[in-house]
Amino acid sequence: MKGLMACFVLLLAALPAPALAEEWLELTGFQLIDGSGAVARPVQSMLVRDGRIVAIDGQGSRPAAGARWTRIDLAGTWVMPGLIDTHVHVSNFADPRKGERILRAALRGGVTAVRDLAGDTRSLGELERAIAVREWLGPDLVYSALFGGPDVFRNDPTSTMSPGRVPGQAPWGRQIDAGTDLRLAVAQARGTGAKNLKVYADLDARQVRAILREARAQGMQTTAHATVFPARPGDLVKAGVGSLAHAPYLIWEAVDTVPDDYSQRTKAPWDKVPADHPRLLALYRDMAERGVFLDATLYIYKSMKDFAPGRLETAWTDAALAWGAQATRLARAAGVRVTTGTDWFESRDEGGLPNTHAELALLVELAGFTPQQAIVAATRDGAAALGLDDQGSVEVGKLANLIVLDADPLADIHNTTRLRMTIKRGEPVAATGF
C-alpha cells in the first residue's frame, strides 16, 4: 500500500489541472456511494470535464478524438460526495490568513462545501473570491449575516465580529429593535455578499416573523438558533425558517416559559423534559412537513470542555449532548432532514482532520443513524440546506466534488477518515498529513 500511495502522490504532482477546457479526467475501478441513500455499486468509469461529471459508465457523453486525457485507476476504493459542514466559523481571528489555512486543511480532509454562520463578511467575501477564482483550493463557501436583539451585541462574542464598527451597526451584524427598517437592513446584509441570514437571539416571535418574511422576500436563505430567547422553536418553524441549529435547544418548545435572556440556554431542564414530549413530537412533525432542516451540532457539546479549558462553565454539556442526540434521532424518524454542522470544525492539531468526520460518527453512535443515513446528512441534505443544487450527490451533471476512501464507510462510518484524496471540481487534492 505504501508503494501504491507513493506512486499516486507522484502522479498527482505530475498531473496538469484537469478542469481546463477540453481536458478530461477519468476515474476507473471503484465502488460508488452516490449520496442518494442507494447501496454502493461498482463503477468502471466516471468522466469529468470542466469540473462536472459528464458520464458514469454508459450514461452521459464521451470525449471527442484528440481531447487531452488523464486517467486515475482507483483500484477498488470507495468514492462518495464530498462532505458538507453546515455550521462553521472561519473569520473571527486576529490573523486574517487563519481562515485560509482552515479552509485549505478542510478540503484536504474531505470537506468540499461549508456554511459559515456569521462572522466578518469583509474577510469571508475575500475568502469566497479567492476560492472562486482558484487562487487556492478550498471548500465552496456560503456565508451569513447575523441579526439579533440589543443584548446580543453587549457581551456576547458577536460584539467583536465587526472591528472598526459600532457593535450591532455593521450590515453583517445588525442589532434589531422597534425602529429598525427591516427592508433596508436585509438589503444591506445581502449587499455584503451573504446568501444566508442567521437569526440569533434576544428576539420575540413577532420580530422573528417580520425578519424571516423580509429575508424570504429578498431571496435570502435563513437559519436560526433552535431557540432565540424568547422566540421558541415552534415560532421559528411557523415563521418559515430554513434551518434550526443546535438540537439541544429544541427542548424549550416543551418548557412553559422561555426566558428572554440568551445566557439561560445552558440552564435547560434536559434531565426533566424527555425528547419525546408530546410538544416536541409535534414540533418534529411540523419541521418535516415544512421542510425545516436540523443542524444538530452534536460535536460542539461533546468537545466544549476542550474548547477553552477552565474558561467556560461546561458542566451542562453532557446532559445537553445526550438529550440533543435523542432529539436528533426522533426528528430524523419524523422525516426531518438532518445536516452535519460542527460549530467548531477546524482540527486542534496541525494537519488534523476536520471535525465534520466526528459529527458523522456521533450521528451513528449517539443518534442511531445508520452509516448510510449519516452520509446522506453530510452530503445530499447538506447541499440542499445550503441551496447548492449542483452538488451533494454523484450523478451526471453535478460538480465533481468527491472524496476517495480506502475503506467502506457503509461498513464503519469511521472509514470516512480513510482518505486517499479529495476531488474538488474535478481537481485531485492529495490527502496528505493525516
Image: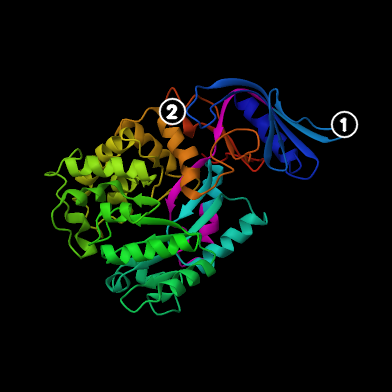
Residue 34 appears at what percent x and percent y? Answer: 54, 30
Q: Which mark is residue 144?
A: none
Q: Secondary structure at mark 1?
A: loop
Distance between the alpha carbons at the discs numbered 1 and 2? 39 Å
**Which amino acid, mark 2?**
Gln
* Label 2 packing within 10 angstroms: few (<14), some (14-19), many (20+): many
| Numbered range of the magenta stretch | 73-102
**Which amino acid, mark 1?**
Ala
On whether residue 82 falls in the magenta region, the answer is yes
Judging depth in this view, the residue of 234 and 356 nearest the camera is 234
Judging depth in this view, the residue of 23 and 258 nearest the camera is 258
Q: Taking the image as drawn, is residue 352 in sight? A: no
* Label 1 packing within 10 angstroms: few (<14), some (14-19), many (20+): few
Q: Which mark is residue 65?
A: 1
Q: Secondary structure at mark 2?
A: helix
On whether residue 20 falls in the magenta region, the answer is no
Q: Taking the image as drawn, is residue 336 in sight? A: yes
Residue 323 appears at what percent x and percent y? Answer: 22, 41
Position above or below: 351 against 163: above
Residue identified by numbered label 2: 372
- Upstream in the sequence, badge 1 or badge 2? 1
Which residue is drawn at the image coordinates 34% and 72% (left, top)? 176
Is mark 1 in CB contact (under 8 Å) with mark 2? no
Q: Is residue 170 left or right of residue 317?
A: right
Position above or below: 337 against 386: above
